[in-house]
Amino acid sequence: MTRNSTLWAMLGFVLMAISLFMVFVYAPMEREMGVIQRIFYFHVPLAWVSFLAFFIVFVGSILYLWKKETRWDILAHSAAEIGVVFTTLVLITGPLWARPIWGAWWVWDARLTTELVLWFIYVGYLMVRSFASHPAQAARLAAVVGIVGFVDVPIIALAIVLWRTQHPGPLVWSGGLAPPMFLTLMVSLVTVTYLFFLMMAQRVAVSSMEEDIEKLKESIRGYS
């Protein structure tokens, strides 16, 4: 690990420590839900940043199909892998929060269902890449899935407006949060976003090295 990488990682640990302090100490206890409400400060940033990840997949996929440059495919693939991880965490933290409040781990609510569909779409994206017979074909097919699948993201965002849903409404921008809660959420969002880009940088670097190794192997085969 280079010196710069170490510094970026240390900054990530500092941000995580500040976020955890604010979530468990600084933010006041919510009167109705109690301590379980603190999952909110993890659940919401994870959801927002998963949308960011799939937006990057969307843009990277368009640019790959347009320019046929491998770097855009690497960007989209890396974002999809991390986005699936974040969406998985959203689908875990959601039921953990819902069980004490709704009395059920899962309900077929519009937002929950469309979030699950999103997870399946991008797991499918990764599976397409794994099972396609040729890397270029895998990249093209996955790009189509990445572009079409992004349609589900605005549907998830608007689900609580379009349909009657058990999911809480848009408290963040409607003034439904006390200032310390809002500040804690924003710090958590910054932290999760930072960690996402840190992971993206590492994953893109690894994928680029893998691509260089494959090119080197092909050139060696050409000489043999």
Image (cartoon, helix red, strand yellow):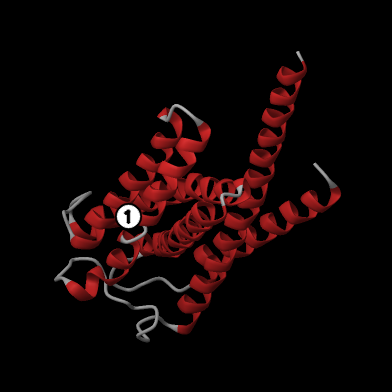
In the image, is 4 to the left or to the right of 17?
Answer: right
* Residue under numbered circle 1: 94
At x 51%, y 37%, the residue is 136
Quadrant in the picture for residue 149:
bottom left
In the image, is 207 to the left or to the right of 172?
Answer: right
Query: Residue 113 appears at what percent x and percent y?
Result: 22, 54
In the image, is 152 to the left or to the right of 191?
Answer: left
At x 48%, y 48%, the residue is 80
Quadrant in the picture for residue 153:
bottom left
Query: Residue 22 appears at what percent x and percent y?
Result: 55, 68
Question: What kind of element bears circle 1?
Answer: helix
Count how many numbered circles sit on residues in the image: 1
Name the quarter where the N terminus is drawn: top right
* Viewer-nearest residue: 138 or 45: 138
User: As drawn, which residue projects farthest toward the bottom?
Assistant: 175
At x 27%, y 75%, the residue is 169
At x 77%, y 18%, the residue is 223
* Viewer-nearest residue: 215 or 113: 215
Query: Residue 86 appears at what percent x and percent y?
Result: 45, 51
User: As drawn, which residue projects farthest toward the top?
Assistant: 224
* Viewer-nearest residue: 34 or 120: 120
Above/below status of 84 relative to 182? above
- Disc 1 marks which amino acid? Gly
Query: Residue 38 appears at what percent x and percent y?
Result: 42, 63
User: As drawn, which residue projects farthest toward the right?
Assistant: 3
